[in-house]
Amino acid sequence: MREKIQDGSQVKMHFSLMLEDQTVIDTNFDREPVCFFIGDGNLLPGFEKALIGMQTNQEGTFEIEPQEAFGQHNNQNVQTLDLSSFDDNIEVGSVYSFQNGDGELPGVIIEINESTVQVDFNHPLAGKIILFKVKILAIENEDKN
């Protein structure tokens, strides 16, 4: 019996993330495969859920809804900040890094006014359906004795 992906499986695979219009966001089909454990937190839950039950050499393309991928767009994550906080080279579409407690939070400039700047702190893929294409190369499961 061939191994199937389950919680705790170590999986080696190629993948592509695409928007609904087939625009490729990320892929490793042209590079080394990735290796990870199901349930280790490296993949979002919707992507892991799509892999459960797949077998070695199996391929698939899955439509992942926003709430299972990068979340819904949240208007509360769009903030208005004072223009004086930015340098003179600010441009719409540019990504700035903001201090957030102990870490940094990226934000995309979406509008520049006379004295304010609107910054979107949502993930750039929030609210989008993601097409997740995979080819499973190897699966290792812990022995169940």
Image (cartoon, helix red, strand yellow):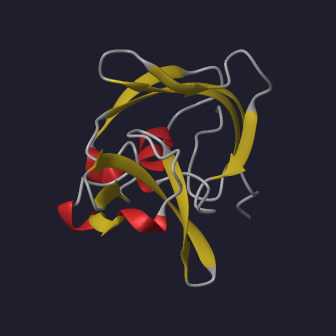
141 and 103: which is toward the camera: 103
Which residue is pictured at 30% across the width and 49% down the height? 112
Instruction: Pick out the residue farthest to the left.
Output: 75
Instruction: Pick out the residue farthest to the right.
Output: 32
Lateral position of residue 98 relative to residue 102, left or right: left
Q: Position of residue 113 (x, y in %)?
A: 25, 52
Q: Position of residue 11 (x, y in %)?
A: 69, 41
Q: How many numbered marks have been drawn onto this rendered protein structure?
A: 0
Lateral position of residue 72 relative to residue 35, left or right: left
Which residue is pictured at 68% across the width and 24% down the height? 28
Which quadrant: the N terminus? Answer: top right
Which residue is pictured at 28% across the width and 62% down the height? 115
Q: Position of residue 3 (x, y in %)?
A: 65, 38
Q: Is residue 140 visible?
A: no
Residue 21 image-quadrant placement: top left
Q: Is residue 68 visible?
A: yes
47 and 84: which is toward the camera: 84
Which quadrant: the C terminus? Answer: bottom right
